[in-house]
Amino acid sequence: MRMAVMGASGRMGQMLVRLIDESDQATLSGAVERAGHDWIGRDLGQAMGGAARGVVVTDDVAVALAASDVIIDFTSPAVTVALAQAAAAAGVAHVIGTTGFSDADLAEIAQAGQTGRIVRAGNMSLGVNLLVTLTQQVAAALGADYDIEIVEAHHRHKVDAPSGTALMLGEAAAAGRGVALSDVADRGRDGITGARVGGAIGFHAIRGGDFIGEHDVIFAGAGERITLRHVASDRALFARGALKAALWLEGQGPGEYSMLDVLGL
Ligand code: NAD
């Protein structure tokens, strides 16, 4: 399968390039960076500090789409929304790892998924997606007299909060309780907040150092607490999930899928 990497110089982009190179089911068909990036026009292998490999980094998405079966995209929301439309129009599948979307962005991606083939996941790891299903089950079993708090920690460079994964976990908890997350989310308390509102789902974000990604879902009741925890210790985890999603999309019809679909959860 021919795969192009968007944001090829990024933390996830470089990881994906290495993983595609190791795969016997995938070949790297393009490497895209933002206009003005100093890798544009350079050989990707050399830009990554190795030998030349004959893939030149481009800012021309159309060139990458024309050469590819799928685009893997860990960039930023505005870039991803535009790419979703372009990929659907070109008949190229789109794996979206980007996080931090607004509701309007999500509506545009859903629109692209009417004709295009998309996997979008705020977290591509098997463990986190299992945690999502467990969170929904525990939230349903415990009911609203257990307070739910979601605490996440990421590296100092992360630009959005709460993390896409924290929001996935919040959605799962809300679904387990049969409520809409937008009605109950309580993001980052500060000051004289008053007592906790019953049924709220709280979010808290730690930022610092080189945390790759940690998530706790705490169910705090009277006299007991349950914590579901996931710790990512290697960023390659997310890249492996994205590669799996890309290969899975080959056999699918149009739609916007999640990692739960890819993993059969
Ligand atoms: P990063 O800043 O290291 O990489 C992003 C790259 O995108 C940069 O190299 C940037 O130059 C490039 N870019 C910006 N505009 C572009 C454009 N128009 N065309 C092509 N490339 C462009 O960030 P990162 O840590 O790799 O994370 C990227 C995104 O992926 C974030 O939203 C992050 O939250 C998300 N993420 C998701 C998962 C997951 O499992 N879903 C895991 C890790 C990170």
Image: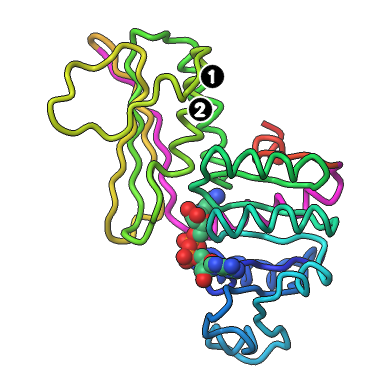
Q: Is residue 168 above or below residue 163?
A: above
Examine the image and state in which quarter residue 63 appears. bottom right
Q: Is residue 7 visible?
A: no
Amino acid under label 1?
A: Ala
Please check the rendered image and state whether residue 237 is part of the magenta-colored stretch, yes or no. yes
Q: Which image quarter is the N terminus in?
A: bottom right
Q: Is residue 216 above or below residue 184?
A: below
Q: Position of residue 14 (x, y in %)?
A: 56, 71
Element marked by disc 2: helix
Q: Position of residue 264 (x, y in %)?
A: 71, 34
Q: Which image quarter is the C terminus in?
A: top right
In the picture, measured across the screen, residue 80 lies left or right of residue 189, that is right
- Which mark, by number, is residue 171? 2
Residue at image point 66% right, 91% down: 52
* Residue at the spot of label 1: 175
Residue at image point 67% right, 74% down: 31
The answer to whether mark 1 and mark 2 are in CB contact below 8 A is: yes
Identify the residue at the far front of this view. 104
In the picture, measured across the screen, residue 56 lies left or right of residue 255, that is left
Find the magenta span and give its range.
Answer: 224-253
